[in-house]
Image (tube, rainbow, N blue to C red):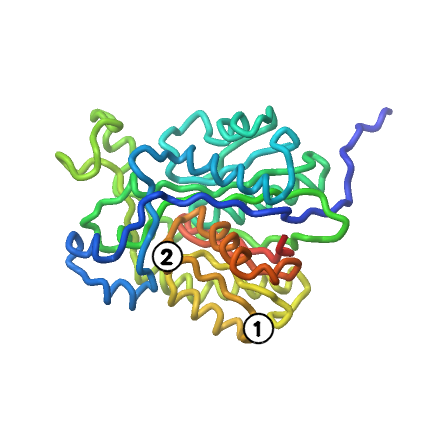
Amino acid sequence: MTTLKQNEMNRYSRILGYGAARGEVLVHNNDIVEAINSSDEWITQRTGISTRHRASENQSVADLAFGSAHDALAAAGVDGADIGAVIVSTISHPYATPSLATLVAEEIGSKCPAYDISAACAGFCYGIAQADALVRSGAAQNVLVIGVEKLSDFIDNTERSISFLLGDGAGAAVVGVSDEPGIAPTVWGSDGSRWGTVGMTHSLLDIRNRDFVQNPVGEGEKIWPTLRQDGPSVFRWAVWEMAKVAQQALEAAGITADELGALIPHQANARIIDQMAKTLKLPESVAIARDIADAGNTSAASVPLAAHRLLRENPELSGTFALQIGFGAGLAFAAQVVVLP
């Protein structure tokens, strides 16, 4: 009997380069505090956020994705036509179908497989896990992974649990073939018992008799779906459970915390980041990505934007180990140790 042909196996992958695109409008705390009856001091102390980038009216989710894609390709030294798959993680693409990823593939000049995933703040790390598998299996030579959000389209400016946290942007990475392991096994999963702690105020079924597209946030009846969360529950889960996942990712990589060059956590809240670093007992030599103060929480774009900034400001970290971890709605989570490009 003839044996089925298989793709090349037993090869390694690594991140070749990161790219970024940010919303064009810089929004300060004082610009939004009146609507939520708060203060700059309260937001800064509770979250570590002083500003957040938000997209202009004419800047779409696709625009952000395109910008980060071209930036990542340039950093990796890879031509768009040589990308073998595009994976886009987003919760704010305005179309359920077709995917944003196919638009990105067209933009970079590739006819490769392209698809979207929805894992919110864990989405980029989910994408890196899939890109690693595609490259190592031989299914693709290079994979473009993008996390992109225009969360400002889904914000109720008077909502106090999450609206003031959110920003817009896109982060991308090119994953390609490596002579040595550059992406460790991913520790990932979900906790559906907490499904309702972060999400939308309405579903499409709730508003199927309304004109969803034309009814803007804040006008008429509150039927436009906006984001909300049970902040205290999410905070406790992130602080205690995600530190365990981070430790498991270190063990899966076969390294210890003192061998890290950097920690790149989801930029959800500065206090969560601080507690995670403390629980992991990170030495002072480990750089911690802190994009949140200027960018806010950008969901799927959070980890790659933080990685891009960290490398731009600390180029000496190139070639060191970084633990990147994303966690959020679903509740979904993923973490892996990577070699920084």
Q: Name the residue rendered at 38%, 53% in the picture.
A: 295
**Left or right of residue 320: residue 125:** left
Q: Where does residue 39 sit, x and y in percent of width and height?
A: 19, 62
The amino acid marked with disc number 2 is Asp
Q: Quadrant of residue 315?
A: bottom right
Q: Which residue is mark 2?
A: 294
Q: Where does residue 251 sit, x and y in percent of width and height?
A: 64, 64
Mark seen at residue 285: 1
Question: Where, quadrant-wise, is the N terminus in this rendering?
Answer: top right
Q: Name the residue rendered at 37%, 57% in the picture.
A: 294
Mark seen at residue 51: none
Numbered disc 1: secondary structure: loop
The amino acid marked with disc number 1 is Ser
Which residue in the rendered view is the most extreme toward the left? 220
Disc tally is: 2
Q: Name the residue rendered at 48%, 52% in the picture.
A: 303
Q: Which residue occupies the foreground of this view, 17 or 201? A: 17
**Left or right of residue 35: residue 69:** right
Q: Name the residue rendered at 85%, 24% in the picture.
A: 2
Q: Where does residue 160 sit, x and y in percent of width and height?
A: 22, 55
Whichever of callouts 1 and 2 sits on the residue coming sooner in the sequence is: 1
Q: Where does residue 145 sit, x and y in percent of width and height?
A: 55, 41
Inter-mark Cα distance, 1 to 2 = 23 Å
Q: Quadrant of residue 249?
A: bottom right
Numbered disc 2: secondary structure: helix
